[in-house]
Image: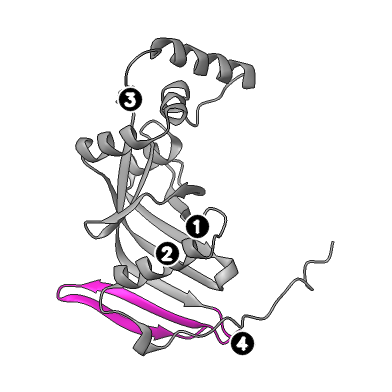
Amino acid sequence: MNYEEHRRNYVLGGLRRENLTDNPFELFENWQAQAIAAELKDPTAVSLATLEPSGNLWQRIVLLKGVNEGGFVFFTNYESNKARALAKDNRGAMLFPWHELDRQVSASGCITKISDEESDRYFASRPRASQLGAWASSQSRPVANRDTLITQYHSAEQRFAEGPIPRPPHWGGYRLVPEQIEFWQGGEHRLHDRFRYVRGEHGWSIERLQP
């Protein structure tokens, strides 16, 4: 297969300095709202990169579940590979790929657990089947086959047959607090618009980057 011919022009508009907000989270939430309004598939999906204990970098897709306290919130199993990586080195990076809008947002910084109260509130809002799935799966651990996984799910169903399902102690949220955020808007002739926000002692500084 020849991949060299797979290319397209970026013509959906530019990004200018006067379009930026002083606080990058305001611009991010505007872009995120536009991605949702455009009915993109999984508009809150974000690629999360961490440094594994082995020294390898690894990425996976998670879903953004909030922007608060100066950071991006997601949820996972505290015994998953990503959680084990963060326990050893809590630096991480995110990439939001809104291809249909010719946009990307990248962020990097430190990732820490959110409070139990925040995790409890979000877990209580999840569909019951998703709550059961959190109890049923030992995320990132090997499993013999899908039948075993289904059996574990049915066991969780029986365990919590009545009443509300509590949040598993091994499941909860994290927040990435960025030290820098970059906004990328595709441009004609590969002259893309890139602006990077860098957190400093007195707030955010902004610089335009060449494509």
Quote the CA–CA distance across marks 3 and 4.
Answer: 49 Å
**Circle 4/circle 1 CB separation < 8 Å:** no
Q: Residue at x 46, y 41 (%)?
A: 54
Q: Is residue 188 magenta?
A: yes
Image quarter of residue 178? bottom left
* Residue 177 x/y as whole percent: 28, 58
Q: Amino acid at mark 4?
A: Glu
Mark 3 neighbour class, 10 Å CA radius: few under 14, some 14 to 19, many 20 or more: some
**Circle 1/circle 2 CB separation < 8 Å:** yes
Q: Amino acid at mark 2?
A: Gln
Q: Which residue is mark 1?
A: 43
Circle number at residue 32: 2
In front of the other: label 4 or label 1? 1
Circle number at residue 208: none
Q: Relative to 24, is 121 above or below?
A: above
Locate the N terminus by quadrant.
Answer: bottom right
Q: Residue at x 45, y 84 (%)?
A: 15
**Circle 4/circle 2 CB separation < 8 Å:** no
Q: Amino acid at mark 3?
A: Pro
Quote the CA–CA distance across marks 1 and 3.
Answer: 27 Å
